[in-house]
Image (tube, helix red, strand yellow):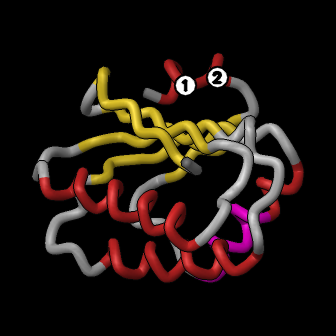
Amino acid sequence: MFATFNYTQFPIIYVHLNSTIIDDHDFTHFTDEWLQIYKKQQYFTLIFDTSQISYIPLIYSIRMAQFIQTLKQQPIQYLQQSIMIITNYFVQTMASIIFKLQSPVAPVYIISDKFYIHSIL
């Protein structure tokens, strides 16, 4: 599974992203679970740990930009902010592509170390 969501500290949700997206099912599972959070109708923060990602095909950056557009159509933006822990250049480049194609729905903080999470929150 590409993404594991941890709700134990809700409204802060930790999303651990594993080595790579294997197929469309992985990506759909990731976006479906994200949409389920909106159904709670409560404000939340996402913290993405990308430190284990080794490779993501470019098509999923494009699909992520399309998903962000879908999120923007939600009547209420419950996502307050996202924090992305990015430790390698490849993932940084992919995030840049996504945000050039589609601006985020909420502020995004990109950090290289988990140490900075608490100061952002």
Across and down, in percent, residue 92 comes to 78, 55
Across and down, in percent, residue 23 comes to 62, 69
Q: At x 72% / y 25%, what residue is drawn?
A: 113
Q: Front-most of 26 and 54?
A: 26
Q: Is 119 placed above or below 32 here?
A: above
Q: Residue 56 is drawn in which quadrant?
A: bottom right
Q: Amino acid at mark 2?
A: Lys
Q: Which mark is residue 60?
A: none
Q: Amino acid at mark 1?
A: Ile
Across and down, in percent, residue 57 comes to 76, 71
Crowding near the residue tagged with mark 1, few <14, some 14–19, many ≥20 C-alpha atoms within 10 Å: some
Q: Main secondary structure of the magenta part?
A: helix
Across and down, in percent, residue 93 comes to 81, 62
Q: Residue 39 is drawn in which quadrant?
A: bottom left
Is residue 76 part of the magenta span, yes or no?
no
The magenta stretch spans which residues? 94-101
Q: Is 43 placed above or below 73 here?
A: above
Crowding near the residue tagged with mark 2, few <14, some 14–19, many ≥20 C-alpha atoms within 10 Å: few
* Residues under numbered marks 1 and 2 in contact, where contact means CB atoms less than 8 Å apart: yes
Q: Report the quarter where the C terminus lies.
A: top left
Residue behind mark 1: 117
Local secondary structure at mark 1: helix
Q: At x 65% / y 17%, what residue is drawn?
A: 115
Q: Which mark is residue 114?
A: 2
Q: At x 32% / y 48%, what residue is drawn?
A: 80
Mark 1 vs mark 2, CA separation in Å:
6 Å
Q: How many marks?
A: 2
In the image: residue 81, left or right of residue 55? left
